[in-house]
Amino acid sequence: MPYIALLILLLVLAPSSALAADLSVKSHEGRTLMVRYEDMKGASLSVLSSSGEVVRSSRLPKATGVKRVMLPKNLEAGTYTILASDREGAKYDSETFTISYPAPTCTLKASEKALHKGDLLRIRWNSDNATSAVLFGQKKVALNGSERISVHHLGPHGYAVNLVGPGGVGSCAVEVKVVE
């Protein structure tokens, strides 16, 4: 999976505290939020969804340092807020960040571009950023694979793999021609 890194700097709202976060998205299956902070002893750290739901929370163990927060694996793409507050709930600092996923992509190749009626065609595909793949618009297939197809009808024939992933949908296609 491609490695995506987002850097989020959380600006100081109160002059006596500072908070910075480095969000590393390693894949759509897991995330680590590295939060750097200063002058926040005993503060709590919360990650909130756009609806205000607490996705993850933890305490900052010392006044200054780096806290590693594991975010849920099924976290949807969207806007989130990281919030640091003191023991009484007074806000130290907050900042929003966005988690997004790249759209699924694939390549599809045919063993031949021109075949004779009755020949076997082999198609191969590879995908990235996908969670499911469908061949011919109906047959669920592996994210990376190949298929042998016996061609019987003359003329041009198109083959496609359709993908779905956290970043949306994608597809790839190849066309071959069948002659007598």
Image (cartoon, rainbow, N blue to C red):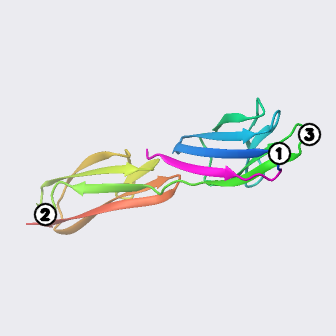
Q: Does the magenta portion include 16?
A: no
Which residue reaches farthest front?
15
Q: Which residue is mark 3?
A: 88
Eye-nearest disc, 2 or 3: 3
**Neighbourhood count class around disc 3 (C-alpha, 10 Å): few under 14, some 14–19, many 20 upward:** few
- Measured as percent of width and height from the top left, residue 36 is found at 68, 40
Q: Earlier in the sequence, mark 1 or mark 2?
A: 1
Q: Which disc is residue 32 wearing? A: none
On residue 114, the disc is: 2
Q: Which residues are magenta?
A: 1-14
Q: Amino acid at mark 2?
A: Ala
- The number of callouts visible is 3
How many C-alpha atoms fall within 10 Å of the one at disc 2: few (<14), some, or many (≥20)?
Answer: some
Indicate left or right for 34 with 155 as reference: right
Front residue of this view, candidates 37 and 5: 37
Q: Are marks 1 and 3 in contact (CB under 8 Å)?
A: no
- Quarter containing the N terminus: top left
